[in-house]
Amino acid sequence: MLLLAFDTATPAVTVALHDDSRVLAGSTRIDARRQGELLAPGIVDVLRAAGRARAELTDIAVGVGPGPYTGLRVGIVTALALGDALGIPVHGVCTLDALAYAAGRDATVAGPFVAATDARRKEVYWARYDDAHTRVEGPSVDRAGDLAATVTALPAVGAGAALYPDSFADVRGPEHPDAAALAAFAVERLAAGLALLPPEPLYLRRPDAQVPAGYKAVTPVGPPPGA
């Protein structure tokens, strides 16, 4: 197996390559406005650093959010296009699961905890975990101040928790998802015969752009009489 993993559901544009035994190379850039510009060069750089060719890839794993509409679709569309071109499977991974897996790998948490990313509008995307491998609630999107005390009292990882220290009592790292962790998570589940998600976005809410309600319909003007 040679699995390429990447995620653009957060400000972290992160890419990694995994050969079924270890991560061969990785790259992460933090820029919430340039996912479309940074992802393709990141993929090229990681393949070059590992000394591997795109044609050698056997699988792709992509973070499917939850995340904002524009950033999230960059990664998923790229994964689907690359998978189609190479004729290889594309697997989805919940971005919060990858963040939780990274926290377990880095030993910043051990027991129950929460992973949260920034959803803007004073909201967070969040999920609750028994451990780094086991999600027990979520993913959901809520205002940080509206979360239950049973959630906010737990140790929390991710930029969403860091933004609201008055809501989350015990904030720890990592702050952003890491494609190295996403890749290892995907490889582990595939090796165990466990299913991953379809490569479809987890938006959790409607996009900011909406058709205005109550707009006035315009009646088309027909040809003049006798035309």
Image: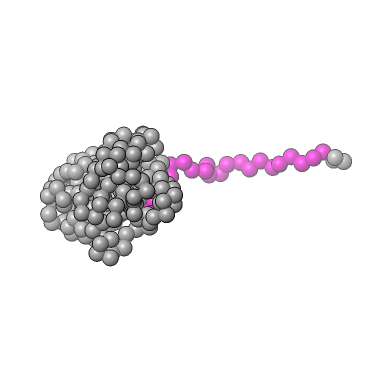
Q: Quadrant of residue 31?
A: top left
In the picture, measured across the screen, residue 90 lies left or right of residue 20, that is: right
In the image, farthest residue toward the bottom: 193
Q: Is residue 227 visible?
A: yes
Looking at the rendered structure, the number of numbered marks drawn on it comes to: 0
Magenta span contains residue 219 = yes
The location of residue 61, given as percent across then percent down, is 32, 52
Secondary structure, magenta segment, majority class: loop
| Picture quarter with the C terminus | top right
Magenta span contains residue 217 = yes
In the picture, measured across the screen, residue 98 lies left or right of residue 216, that is: left
Question: Which residue lies at the image location 36% right of the left edge and 46% below the top edge?
Answer: 54
Q: How is the image coloured?
A: one colour
Which residues lie in the magenta part?
Answer: 199-224
The location of residue 66, given as percent across then percent down, is 34, 49
In the picture, measured across the screen, residue 196 lies left or right of residue 214, that is: left
Residues 52 and 93: in front is 52
Q: Is residue 185 visible?
A: no
The location of residue 9, given as percent across then percent down, is 33, 44
Question: Which residue lies at the image location 30% right of the left edge and 45% below the top edge?
Answer: 52
